[in-house]
Image (spheres, rainbow, N blue to C red):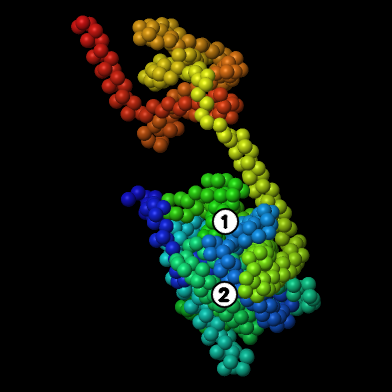
Amino acid sequence: MSFIDVVLGRPLASDEDHRQKINVKEGIPIFGLDALGSAAYGPEAALTILIPLGMVGIRYILPLSAAIIGLLAIVYFSYRQTIEAYPHGGGSYTVASQNLGLYPGLLAAAALMIDYILVVAVGIAAGVGALVSALPSLQTHTLTICLGILVIIALINLRGVRDTGWAFMAPTYIFVGCLMAVVVVGMCKSLLHVGHPTPVVAPPALVPTTGAISAWLLLKAFSSGCTAMTGVEAVSNGVMAFRDPKEKTAQKTLTVIIGVLMFLLAGIAYLSRVYHVGATLPGSGNYESVLSQITGAVLGKGIFYYLTIGSILTVLSLQANTAFADFPRLCHALAQNGYMPRTMANRGRRLVYSQGIYVLVLLAGLLLIAFGGITDRLIPLFAIGAFLAFTMSQAGMVAHWRRVGGHHAKHSMLINGLGAIATAATVIVVAISKFSEGAWITLFVIPGLLATMVTIRKHYDKVAEEIEAPMPLSVENLCAPLVVVPVEQWSKIAQRTLRFALAISKSIHVLHIDNEECTSDLHDRWQELVEEPTRKAGLPVPELVVLKSPYRLTITPILKYVLEMQRRFPDRQIAVVVPDIIQKHWYEYFLHSHRGKLLALLLVFKGNQRISVINLPWHLEEGSVEAREMSAQVAERLSRQRAA
């Protein structure tokens, strides 16, 4: 078994796709990590905005969380409708493009792409933030740890959907179990102490009140807290990954994910209130995450504390799997319609869209580097993409039910319409409240992505129009090409290249560079080496063209000559046969000039379709065997002629 097979698993055949289908148990870690993990940073994001209010700000976390949970419920029922209506995958792009038109669909796709990239960056940054809370000495290595985790997640996802589900299953359920245990124990203690429990480890003292309560501040806190809703659309995007019946399995998975998320959001908000837990300034020396404070206050900082923090770190980091599951699928859908490079529509060795994974890793990595791996700096960019995608999907579903009709159409339209209005209002609130904090970047990037996708499609349309051939094959006026063969010196490689040229054409120009430094006897021995053997064989004699190069250039004179031949013979095909030495070992690659590859590349870009480049490889060692066999055949032929 090769090293690649060990790391990424053996290649899977296309007919093994059914073995990669997943059930509810596996679907939760694959499609639910984003939503479940956001419980760790959504409430903290809201509390961070409320820091200037001190103790007063803690009082508002419960009503803010209630509003977010209410919005989450609306979106949940909306996406249940989407799964039922689009059992083959009802991502925002699919729903919006089929029901609202091309540009609304591309707008949803651009928003989703931003959302998925930020899911990876925010999730990993939040996970490392949890680690730094427990081990402050690692704070200076935040970015390095983030990038390391990104690479590990990418390798896991390249192994395929089912392997990814099994790999993430234990961390997911440990995380959910630990966090639910903290919430349940914390609530029980609060009830026993009539809402005033004594913390085992007191959380950091809240800062004095330095700001005034305002509707604007509460809107900003709400918009930051809404990041807890990201990932809700993931299940509807990946319905095709589930086992039959796909719709029912996907709906059950979505129900479990949303139910657990609602419970955690409500529990965290309640415990923050009763234990007086507020956010600390991210990136500061005394930073401690909200979940770290709550866990310490409820159960102390013993073994269970470190188990909980470890599970939070793991799940927050692995929640990027939601994006790794859906971003490549989105790129696949766009590529099939010509709005992304078409190679992104192809599945890799493990039946996943590998190129989409590579792109996601690159973009998320650049984002982590740009923001230093700090979660709070990424939050303002996060919510707009997610909620804009929500809005386009729900508006598309309203149009879908209106077109389809039926007994339940009005009820379904009401649910999706309410979801569209609620998420659209959230987009507006987030865009305004977070504009100066970086949300303007998202509003700038989305039109840029739209323009890029439209440009790609125009390119494909132009290519399709140019190469379209409605007529049958034309066999008129066929003639052999004019062949150009660059030869540096007489060798077995030159001999083999000329034999190939003689086999395909009668018009052969052999180019030899004379730079007045590197001497060669090719010109003097041309008659002996080439002219006499070809005449005796009744073959056309190749023409030797010596190109002077006083400045010791090699590629430029050949390129100029071929382009000149292109102009002189407008009705001829020109074939340039370029010999290329193929090394047996990779390290031998650096011992050769590889001018042939550069010449071929320049001819492709500077020529037109009348110039063809034929690469003729010479495999070292194998070529020596071939040459010896050829020499033996020639010697045997000469001995027969003498004997006759």
Q: Is residue 297 visible?
A: yes
Q: CA distance from mark 2 to mark 1?
A: 22 Å
Of helix, strand and loop, which one carries label 2? helix
Callout 1: SS: helix
Q: Position of residue 59 (x, y in %)?
A: 70, 83
Q: Is residue 530 above or below residue 135?
A: above
Q: Amino acid at mark 1?
A: Leu
Q: Which mark is residue 377?
A: none
Q: Amino acid at mark 2?
A: Ile
Residue 382 drawn at (x, y percent): 65, 63
In the rendered image of this protein, does residue 347 appear above or below residue 132? above
Q: Which residue is mark 2?
A: 258
Say which label, 2 or 1, has the lower sequence index.
Answer: 2
Residue beneath disc 1: 330
Q: Which quadrant of the figure has residue 425?
A: bottom right
Which quarter of the figure is the C terminus placed in? top left
Q: Is disc 2 surrounded by few (<14), some (14 to 19) or many (20+) residues within 10 Å?
A: many
Cβ atoms under marks 2 and 1 closer than 8 Å = no
How far from the left and from the top, in percent, is residue 187? 57, 87
Q: Determine the residue positioned at 27% across, 22% down.
A: 629
Q: As drawn, is 288 to the left or to the right of 418?
A: left
Please rate how many residues cluster around mark 1, counting C-alpha atoms within 10 Å: few if below 14, some from 14 to 19, many from 20: many
Horizontally, is 70 left or right of 542 in the view?
right
